[in-house]
Image: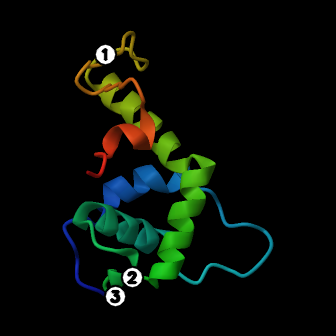
Amino acid sequence: MDRWCYPTDLTDGQWQWIEPLLPSARHYGRHRKHEMREVIDAIFYVLRSGCAWRMLPHDFPPWQTVYYYFRRWTREGVFGDINEALRKEVRAKAGRDEQPSAGILDSQSVKTTEKGGYAATMQPST
């Protein structure tokens, strides 16, 4: 890695845990030009900092590349798979069953209106 370290960068241990969960390179098309660890670090940087993709610091891979992998992995459910594997590991280390036995819905989080959707959030103009 030939760049400054950011607080959002993965540690070596975190990378060793996540790397096997990422899809392998496709057998067709161009070869990967950038390391996937750099792509993941860039994705975490954008998500944590809240910056626009185009404002990604230049020492990361190009923003178009990072955004491509973010969109592709989002569509393919890669981040959901990583989250599920992480949840299982954390629960197992805590001595709990890997699968939760219950879920909670907070009524404050689930708002409903009579109209619903866009119309319910807009004030009528007077």
Q: Tell me the residue that label 1 is attached to.
A: 104
Question: What SS does tag 2 mark?
Answer: helix
Please identify, in this view, whether the residue under mark 2 or under mark 3 is nearer the observer: 2
Tell me which numbered mark, 1 or 3, is placed earlier along the sequence: 3
The residue labelled by disc 3 is 59
Q: Say whether residue 75 is visible.
A: yes
Q: Which residue is mark 2?
A: 54
Quadrant including the N terminus: bottom left
Calculate the distance from the C-alpha at mark 2 to the C-alpha at mark 3.
13 Å
Can residue 35 be seen here? The reply is: no
- Which residue is at the far top? 101
Circle 3: is it few (<14), some (14-19), or many (20+) Cα within 10 Å?
few
- How many numbered marks, from 0 up? 3
Q: CA distance from mark 1 to mark 3?
A: 42 Å
Residue at the extreme right of the image, as rendered: 28
Please state which of residues 56 and 52 is positioned toward the viewer in this rendering.
52
